[in-house]
Image (spheres, grey):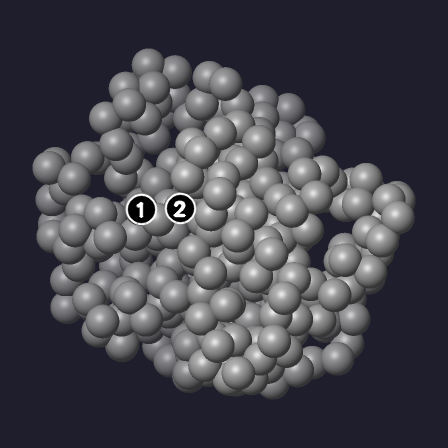
Amino acid sequence: MRILIAGAGATGGYFGARLAQAGQDVTFLVRERRYQQLQASGLVLQTPQGTETLQPQLAQANTLTGHYDLIIVTVKSFALDQVMEDIAPAVGPETLIMPILNGLRHIATLQQRFGEDRVIGGLCKINATLGDNGEVIQMTPLHQLYYGALDGNNDARLQRVDAALRDCQVDTRFSDNIMDELWEKWLLLSTLGAVCCLARGNTQQILTSRGGEALLQGVFSEILSVITAEGYQTRPAATARILELLSDPATPMTSSMYRDLTQGFDIEADQVIGDLLLRAKRHSLATPLLNAVDVNLQVYLQQR
């Protein structure tokens, strides 16, 4: 299977590297700066098991040739419009596109551009970041990759995707209910991002602060009400596990949005929080805590 990874940051770099190491035909679509960095130093993975370096196949938008069987999109959500332009020449009659982005807005955006039958569901769970020299740093052993048809019909096309991905040295989950997985990932990451960005700290600091637990539970409840109104069929055991994970004061957690904010980078405010507020408005839901988070993030973006 010919696979194009759009982006070679922490997510794309890690999972793309594992696919390449498993013998798949993987090309990374990257910008000039990342292209030069990877050409010079290779793709470096720093994992709990040690350091690995590979020489990846690279392409830039103006050098893409031929069609790909699978395009995995791993860029930040605010870069999606440009990436759609970049990958368009690589999309052929049989191409499937698997976005691994935060939130859900990107699914409709990709479907409108490339067609509903081309876009499949995907998400990952990994604690990873880029180091100062562009190395991919996997901070914990967690490295799960979920995928499946958005309508649950995992036909022969999806079976081929599963055959390519399942032996790539990561924990793969071929899901026949990927939409619920996507809703639950959004519940987790938006709650985590909201409380960390609003309180400017990790979950341990928040939970051990006066009113911190109430803040986290309040944000969680508002988000759960929104996604339920939007079509999430609540799985009580799953949502309870998410709240338990977030509420453990012994485990300090932060979100990628919070880490980007503390470094002065652009953030996925509209895609992670703003879209929830738009959906809440559609159902006349009161979300005062999410509104406070959104104002906070807007001010941050104005001050960048």
What amino acid does circle 1 point to? Ala
According to the picture, the residue beneath numbered tag 1 turns out to be 79
Where residue 217 sits in the image (x, y, percent)?
A: 77, 64
Q: Which residue appears at 39% of the width and 21% of the height?
A: 42
Q: Is residue 203 above or below residue 136?
A: below
Q: Examine the rendering and report whether any part of residue 205 can be seen.
A: yes
Q: Quadrant of the C terminus?
A: top left
Residue 79, position as x, y percentages in the image: 31, 46
What element does badge 1 sit on?
A: helix
Q: Which residue is mark 2?
A: 76
Circles 1 and 2: CB atoms closer than 8 Å: yes
Q: At numbered mark 2, what does the secondary structure look like: helix, strand or loop?
A: loop
Residue 267, image x and y in percent? 46, 43
In this rendered view, identify the residue nearer to me: 294 or 149. Answer: 294
Residue toward you, 238 or 63:
238
Front residue (pair 140, 256): 256
Residue at 53% x, 52% y is: 295
- Picture residue at 42% right of the left edge, 83% below the top: 151
Q: Is residue 113 left or right of residue 271?
A: left
